[in-house]
């Protein structure tokens, strides 16, 4: 696998100022049992306003952030802790209100317990 890095100024049509665009071209060698078949080129674009760091540092920081985004995506998809159960906004709001009320009831019941049953004495 070969990599080339280039950078240049880029100003989108709707923007007043120019940004720094870092481009990586990766040559992925596709092989089979007999040897190289084709060269597959992939391009990755990073747009930033950071002009203090080198192009390689920008790529490494973006890759670290992407790894965190992958972790969040896996948590969201696997555990389903961050998803709402229904598809429209009003139902999701109702679900969140019910969840908040249940949490508050649990907290109030914990406060109402006698001192020896799970509640510490206030000092």
Image (tube, rainbow, N blue to C red):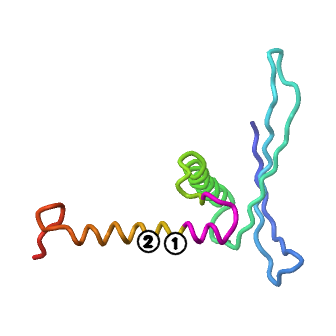
Relative horizontal placement of residue 67, taking residue 26 as reference (left or right): left
- Image quarter where the N terminus lies is top right
Horizontal and vertical percent for residue 45? 78, 58
The numbered mark at residue 101 is 2
Q: Are marks 1 and 2 in contact (CB under 8 Å)?
A: yes
- In the image, 107 versus 67, the foreground residue is 107
| Side of 44 where 89 appears, left or right | left
Q: What element carries label 1?
A: helix
Q: In this view, does 30 lie above or below 95?
A: above
Residue under the point 60% across and 48% down: 77
Q: Where is residue 113 in the image (x, y as percent from the top left)?
A: 20, 67
Numbered disc 2: secondary structure? helix
Instruction: Give the dominant element type of the magenta stretch: helix, strand or loop.
Output: helix
Work out whether 16 lies above or below 120: below
Instruction: For label 2, count other residues whose C-alpha is less than 10 Å away and answer few (under 14), some (14-19) or many (20+).
Output: few
- Which residue in the structure is indicated by mark 1? 97
Q: Where is residue 75 in the image (x, y as percent from the top left)?
A: 55, 50
Give residue 19's position: percent from left, percent from top: 77, 73
Q: Does the magenta stretch include residue 92?
A: yes
Where on the picture, by quarter, is residue 65?
bottom right
**What's the residue at 81%, 66% (across, down)?**
8
Q: Give the range drawn in magenta.
A: 85-95
């Amino acid at each position: 696998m070969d990599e080339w890095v280039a950078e240049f100024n880029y100003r989108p049509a709707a923007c007043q100022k120019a940004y720094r665009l870092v481009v990586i071209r990766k040559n992925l060698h596709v092989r089979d049992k007999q040897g190289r078949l084709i060269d597959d080129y992939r391009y990755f674009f990073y747009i930033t306003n950071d002009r203090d760091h080198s192009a390689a540092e920008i790529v490494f920081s973006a890759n670290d952030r992407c790894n965190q985004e992958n972790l969040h995506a896996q948590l969201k998809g696997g555990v389903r802790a961050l998803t709402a159960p229904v598809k429209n906004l009003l139902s999701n709001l109702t679900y969140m209100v019910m969840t908040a009320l249940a949490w508050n009831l649990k907290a109030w019941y914990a406060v109402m317990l006698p001192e020896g049953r799970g509640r510490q004495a206030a000092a």
